Image (spheres, rainbow, N blue to C red):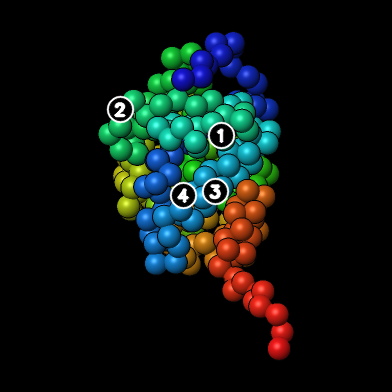
């Protein structure tokens, strides 16, 4: 596990610690199975996470990113981008992983502002994320609904506020019922567009995915293209 720094919290310009959970790549993106085999899904899942983490780290409001994962390959790739990686020692599902990541941050910085962020936001833009976090700063606890209006892509807890993730399925309703404020920061399509299904992937491509996802998609298209015949003419 990468050690967290224990310096005082940063100022408002870079005040948020983001926790990004990522399941083992061999288990990721099962709902893309109708369109892609296991190796392709793992490749895309890693690319999604790389673009998510890179965009988050480029956001002026973000101090650091903690990735919770047991996948050694993904951990190494995301650490190379500048993320702090911790093992999913609870191994008890998504919300337990997020709580573990939050404890990792707040053990070092008890009053850290925290936000859980999905790992599958390939069209994430730093400026859009900054708008969402600026809106979140006005509330003790808040969340952003996904593009479908059913799930959640970001859950925020201001300094001193409890971090109580309720991700999975209809998490928008669960986070609202738990007292978190739903954010309405304007048009932030990249922060809302997570990818679970082939339709989601098409929508993310229309928004314009980051370089890692773009490269992975290009490689998959090339691999699927019919090979030109090498037989001599005649």
Residue lying farthest to the bottom in this orientation:
234
- Asked if the residue at tag 1 contacts the one at tag 4, i.e. Cβ–Cβ closer than 8 Å, the answer is no
- Disc 1 and disc 3 in contact, CB within 8 angstroms: no
Cα gap from disc 4 to disc 2, whole angstroms: 22 Å
Which mark is drawn over residue 39?
A: none
SS state under label 1: helix
Q: Which of labels 4 and 1 is toward the front?
A: 4
Mark 1 and mark 3: span between their CA atoms? 11 Å
Residue that mark 2 sits on: 90
Q: Which residue is mark 1?
A: 78
- Lower position in the chain sequence, tag 4 or tag 1: 4
> Could you tell me if the residues under marks 1 and 2 are in contact, i.e. CB atoms within 8 Å?
no
Percent across and percent down for residue 190 are 59, 53
**Going 45% across and 62% down the picture, which residue do you hit?**
36
Side of 129 relative to 176 (left or right): right
* Numbered disc total: 4
Q: Residue furthest top?
A: 7
Q: CA distance from mark 4 to mark 1?
A: 14 Å
Q: Is residue 92 left or right of residue 223?
A: left
The tag earlier along the polypeptide, 4 or 2, is 4
Identify the residue position indicated by label 4 in the image.
Answer: 42
Which residue position holds label 3? 48
**Is 67 or 110 nearer to us in this picture?**
67
Q: CA distance from mark 3 to mark 4?
A: 10 Å
Mark 1 or 2: the one toward you:
1
- Label 1: few (<14), some or many (≥20) within 10 Å? many
């Amino acid at each position: 596990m990468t050690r967290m720094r224990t310096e005082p919290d940063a100022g408002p310009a870079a005040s948020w610690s983001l926790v990004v959970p990522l399941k083992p790549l061999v288990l990721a993106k099962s709902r893309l199975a109708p369109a892609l085999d296991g190796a392709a899904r793992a490749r895309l899942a890693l690319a999604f996470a790389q673009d998510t983490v890179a965009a988050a780290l480029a956001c002026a409001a973000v101090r650091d990113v903690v990735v919770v994962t047991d996948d050694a390959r993904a951990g190494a790739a995301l650490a190379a981008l500048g993320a702090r990686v911790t093992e999913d020692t609870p191994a008890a599902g998504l919300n337990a992983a997020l709580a573990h990541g939050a404890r990792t941050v707040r053990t070092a910085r008890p009053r850290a502002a925290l936000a859980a962020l999905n790992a599958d936001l390939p069209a994430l833009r730093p400026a859009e994320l900054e708008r969402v976090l600026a809106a979140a700063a006005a509330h003790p606890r808040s969340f952003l609904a996904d593009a479908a209006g059913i799930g959640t892509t970001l859950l925020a807890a201001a300094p001193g506020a409890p971090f109580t993730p309720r991700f999975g399925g209809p998490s928008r309703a669960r986070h609202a019922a738990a007292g978190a404020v739903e954010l309405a920061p304007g048009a932030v399509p990249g922060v809302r567009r997570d990818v679970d299904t082939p339709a989601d992937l098409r929508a993310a491509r229309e928004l314009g995915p980051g370089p890692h996802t773009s490269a992975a998609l290009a490689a998959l298209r090339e691999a699927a293209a019919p090979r030109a015949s090498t037989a001599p003419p005649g």
